Amino acid sequence: MSKADPSNLTRAQYEFLSDLIPEPKKGGRHREVDMWEVLNAIFYVLYEGIQWRALPSDFPVWQTVYTYFRNWRKDGRWLHIHDSLREWTRIDIERHPSPSEAIIDSQSLKSAAMVSQSIGFDSGKKIKGRKRFMTVDTLGLVLRVLVTAANVGERSGGKLVLKRVKQSGNQVYRLTTIWVDGGFDGEPFMQWVMDFCRWIVQVVVRPQKTKGFILLKKRWVVERTFGWLMGCRRLVRDYELLPESETFVYLAMIRIMVRRLA
């Protein structure tokens, strides 16, 4: 690479991450591209918010970069890398690999003009686009994320994303408590979580007659994670025609965690 971009992995960070990168398939064509450059190109797209076709010429050709991004999304490689790094990050600060508490919240985002599928209108926030349902542990590390149309209700989207958390199996075997805001309140939702997931829902609401910013117990953690994601231009607005915006969220967290660990 001819220049060092702020989004690039250092050599030490790449070496730390390299054990999670799959080897070339046996009997296939010899891998000619440098995976360090491929990863840097993907993180460049994430942080700068450019189109794949607009990748600078000092990176590998965009078709090669996008093929790795797409194939690893389809076979679950990105999710595997993300989950491994999350466990290592928790262990690094002397926490148990499996969290006992999680926080859930949603974030509505405008979609790009050319996006026409899976979009809706969030009447509460007056936004036409998509909605991210996010579950994080008490460190703000993402457990699972779900992207839907913006008109999907909090409880409906909450059930779908919690199903994904539940399906992650041994990674959350210690999980007992889910912290939510008032949008997820309601006996049907809380009963469903208890019956299907065997977890307890704790609702944190803003005190009445209060003005301005207030630090709410547990809920500030997921808001901080949303803030981390807004540092990536590709995530400020939903530009994706294909179901790839969830993968970009996991990529953003991979970049944050590998920087901490390496």
Image (tube, helix red, strand yellow):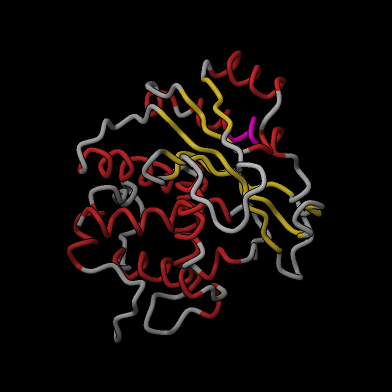
Whether 179 is among the magenta residues is no
Up the image or down, 84 lies above or below 189; here it is below
Up the image or down, 36 lies above or below 135; here it is below
**Side (left or right) of 35 relative to 56:** left
Which of these two is toward me, 70 or 157? Answer: 157
Q: Which residues are magenta?
A: 157-161
Q: Position of residue 57 (x, y in %)?
A: 42, 84
Quarter of the image holding residue 208?
Answer: top right
Placement of the N terminus among the 4 image quadrants: bottom left
Q: Position of residue 118 (x, y in %)?
A: 75, 51
Q: How many marks?
A: 0
Instruction: Work out which residue is located at the far front of the displayed protein and give it.
Output: 209
The residue at the point 58 percent across, 28 percent down is: 163
**Side (left or right) of 83 relative to 220:** left
What is the chief secondary structure element of the magenta stretch?
helix
Instruction: Work out which residue is located at the far top of the displayed protein and give it.
Output: 195
The residue at the point 51 percent across, 20 percent down is: 199
Q: Position of residue 234 (x, y in %)?
A: 55, 67
Quarter of the image holding residue 186?
Answer: top right
Which of these two is toward me, 65 or 160? Answer: 160
Up the image or down, 216 lies above or below 198; here it is below
Q: Position of residue 55 (x, y in %)?
A: 48, 79
Which of these two is toward me, 119 or 195? Answer: 195
Which of these two is toward me, 140 or 98? Answer: 140
